[in-house]
Every structure is written in structure tokens, then in C-alpha cells.
Image (cartoon, rainbow, N blue to C red):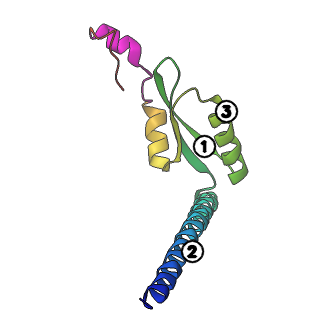
Amino acid sequence: MKLNEPMAAIAKQFADLTLEREKLEYEHARKLRSINAELNNLVEKMALYVDVAKQGCIYVKTWSRDCDMCESTHVLKVDSVDEYYDALESFCEGLEGPGSFTRCTKKEYEAERANPTPTRDRITEAWENGNGNSIYV
């Protein structure tokens, strides 16, 4: 009977430590995600500076789909990291749906300039294919 008190104290201490551990895991996981995001941003920024140092510019390929389901692909060349971020901000402000803004190689840039990806109108395509009432992308 005297064992119940120490066992209850141990159980309470176990529960308290478990709760403390869970709180720490949550806090550290959140901080770790934040640090990882900062590291990824620094790696990306360093790659931009390397591009400018090596080739004198940054090549970018964009893709977007607007609210009417029209898709377009474009490439651009910017001369500095600041111009890259300005172009990214402008691209994001103009989005009406999903999109991507990614660095590309000079070869990809030149290939797209020489033979541009045609704009796609998915609604018209679906209509022409007899699926005007059911569009899945």
C-alpha cells in the first residue's frame, strides 16, 4: 500500500517530462524548419550571384496558368540579382493561378527563344475534344 504514493509520483513525473519533451520537440521542429528555409534561401541567393559572376546574367524560365486556364511559357534574361528579384515580384503580382519562376541554363533560354512553347488554352482544347463540360488539369 505504501508503494502507491511513490508510483503515483513517478507516473506524474513521467507525464510531466513527456509533456515537456513534446513541447520542446514542437518548438525545435518549428525553429529547425525556419532555419532550413533560411539556409535554402541563402543557397538560392548564392547561386544567383554565381550565375551573374560566371555568365554575366541570370536566365529565367516562367510558366503560368491564368484564371481562364490559358498556359504560357516565357524566358527572360536579367543582369543582376536585384533585377531577378524585381522580375520575380512582378511575376508573382501578375499571377491569376499557378505558376513557376525558375533559373534555367543559357541553352534552355536560347532553345525557348528559338522555338517558343505555344500558349495552351485548356478550355478550348477540351471543347474541341468533345469534353467541354469536363475539364481536368
Which residue corresponds to the image point at 52% horizontal and 35% vertical from the top-left? 99
Q: Are circles 3 and 2 on residues that touch, CB within 8 Å?
A: no
Which residue corresponds to the image point at 44% horizontal and 44% vertical from the top-left? 108
Which residue corresponds to the image point at 62% horizontal and 51% vertical from the top-left? 57
Say if the magenta span includes residue 110.
Answer: no
Residue labelled with disc 3: 93
Q: Which residues are magenta?
A: 116-129
Residue labelled with disc 2: 20
Residue labelled with disc 1: 77
Label 3 secondary element: helix
Q: Position of residue 78 (x, y in %)?
A: 65, 45
Q: Indicate which label's residue lies in the foreground, 2 or 1.
A: 2
Which residue corresponds to the image point at 50% horizontal and 17% vertical from the top-left? 68
Q: Position of residue 51 (x, y in %)?
A: 59, 58
User: 104 and 28: which one is in front?
Assistant: 28
Q: Are circles 2 and 1 on residues that touch, CB within 8 Å?
A: no
Above or below — where is 79 with respect to 75?
Answer: below
Residue 1 is tagged as: none
Say if the magenta span includes residue 117.
Answer: yes
Q: The disc labelled 2 sits on which kind of residue?
A: Glu
Figure quadrant of the N terminus: bottom left
Q: Is residue 104 left or right of residue 76?
A: left
Toward the left, the furthest residue is 130
Label 2 secondary element: helix
- Which image quarter: residue 77? top right
Q: Indicate which label's residue lies in the foreground, 3 or 2.
A: 2
The span from disc 3 to disc 2 (Cα, nearest Å) is 43 Å
Q: Position of residue 73 (x, y in %)?
A: 48, 31
Above or below — where is 88 with respect to 116?
Answer: below
Above or below — where is 16 with respect to 119?
Answer: below
Q: Is residue 125 left or right of residue 25?
A: left
Toward the bottom, the furthest residue is 2
